[in-house]
Image (cartoon, rainbow, N blue to C red):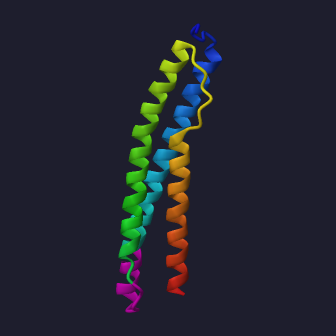
Amino acid sequence: MEPNRDPRVYLAVERTFLAWVRTGLALMGFGFVVARFGLFIREIAATTGRTLPPVGISSWFGIALVMIGVVLNIASVVRYIELLRKTDRGEQLRNPSVLAVILGLGLGVIGAVVVVWLISLR
């Protein structure tokens, strides 16, 4: 096949890569906030003398979100390089992104676990 020389294709691949990087950074930032929120709740409980349910789980969820963000950024670099190579060879870019499917399912599972946990605290 003939390589694709249309700059719009390369720019689209780069925009998609940058969107994945932003998503990974957002997950890492949100994970940091979630992890620190548990510490904040412990401090409030200590100053008010109230007993609260254990909040250690927020640290684990926060760490998990940061790790997912790191893996996502690394995987997005690999995917970006793969798409550039396919574009240079003139291959079609029609395959679904395994990265997007795994991320969507993984975050859906994490969200469901959080919902169940929050309901159990009521």
Quadrant in which residue 61 is drawn: bottom left
Dominant SS type (magenta): helix
State the quadrant of the N terminus. top right
Give whichever of 36, 109 is nearer the camera: 109
Residue 17 x %, y %: 52, 33
Q: How many marks?
A: 0
Quadrant in which residue 73 is drawn: top left
Based on the picture, tell me whether residue 47 belongs to the magenta stretch. yes
Residue 59 x %, y %: 36, 68
Based on the picture, tell me whether residue 76 belongs to the magenta stretch. no
Give whichever of 108, 15 is nearer the camera: 108
Give whichever of 44, 101 is nearer the camera: 101
Residue 103 x %, y %: 51, 50
- Which residue is found at the position 36% from the left and 67% from the top? 60
Which stretch did the figure color magenta?
A: 40-53
Quadrant in which residue 51 is drawn: bottom left
- Which residue is found at the position 36% from the left and 73% from the top? 39
- Which residue is found at the position 41% from the left and 78% from the top? 41
- Which residue is found at the position 48% from the left and 19% from the top? 85
* Left or right position of 66 against 6: left
- Give the vertical position of 14 relative to 75 (above or below): above
State the quadrant of the C terminus. bottom right
- Give the vertical position of 32 relative to 2 (above or below): below
- Give the vertical position of 99 relative to 78 (above or below): below
* Left or right position of 49 against 24: left
